[in-house]
Amino acid sequence: MKRHMYAIGILAVALVFALSATEAAAQKIGFINMRVILHDSEAGKKAQAEMKKSVEKKKAEIAKKEEELKKLKDELEKQKSVLTPEAYREKESSYQVKFRDYQRMVQDANEELAKKEQAITSKMIPDIIKVVEKVGKDGKYDAILDLNNPVIVYHDKEDNLTKKIIDEYNKGAGKSAPAPAKGKK
């Protein structure tokens, strides 16, 4: 989806620069900041709250596992002098397995949260694009570009439609947006 938005931005910029100087002066171009819309709209704030709950839950699970590992490591260090070398190696090996499991758990949690965030964003973007198209048609804009697109070198802040898109999105399209994906319990 990001590549799709990037391609649209490049095509829009190319179209604008392809026009002659007099035609370009008559063009009306607006700008939005998709990240701000995703972050500041009602649906975006709701999704952020859901993500925050998921992050806190994962952090708690990770902290619990971390504490268990710390206790196990401390116990292993305390027993080192009384254990036979072979018994110590066995316990250390067991600790290493649990530590790798912990690392895998952290990595899996990060991947799960990233996928969840991507799913939420993917559900919101089509509705936001519909709102952008409506604002573009109603405002007679020739193009509306996303400020996150690195091709944009200059823009007049007066043409930034981000706030207007958030307001329109909150009025209608954002309320019909699908609820954020629920994580596994």
Image: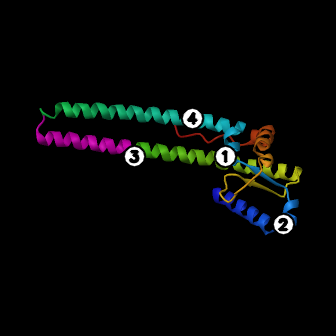
Q: Nearer the viewer, residue 176 or 6?
A: 6
Q: Earlier in the sequence, mark 3 or mark 4?
A: 4
Mark 4 belongs to which amino acid?
Answer: Lys
Residue 173 in the image, given as x and y percentages of width and height: 78, 43
Magenta run includes residue 184: no
Q: Is residue 71 above or below residue 108?
A: above
The residue depicted at 50 percent of the width and 33 percent of the height is: 57
Q: Which of labels 4 and 1 is toward the front?
A: 1
Mark 2 belongs to which amino acid?
Answer: Ala
Q: Earlier in the sequence, mark 2 or mark 1?
A: 2
Q: Which of labels 2 and 3 is toward the front?
A: 2
Residue 67 in the image, given as x and y percentages of width and height: 35, 31
State the residue position of label 3: 104
State the residue position of label 2: 21
Q: Earlier in the sequence, mark 2 or mark 3?
A: 2
Magenta run includes residue 102: yes
SS label for mark 3: helix
The residue depicted at 77 percent of the width and 66 percent of the height is: 17
Magenta range is 83-103
Alpha-carbon span between mark 4 and mark 1:
17 Å
Decide: few, some or many residues near mark 3? Use Cα within 10 Å; few <14, some 14-19, many ≥20.
few
Secondary structure mainly formed by the magenta segment: helix
Q: Earlier in the sequence, mark 3 or mark 1?
A: 1
Residue 46 in the image, given as x and y percentages of width and height: 66, 35
Alpha-carbon span between mark 3 and mark 1:
30 Å
Kindly check if marks 2 and 4 are in contact, taking CB atoms under 8 A apart as contact.
Answer: no
Mark 1 belongs to which amino acid?
Answer: Arg
Q: Is residue 57 above or below residue 102?
A: above
Colouring method of the image: rainbow
Mark 3 belongs to which amino acid?
Answer: Arg
State the residue position of label 4: 52
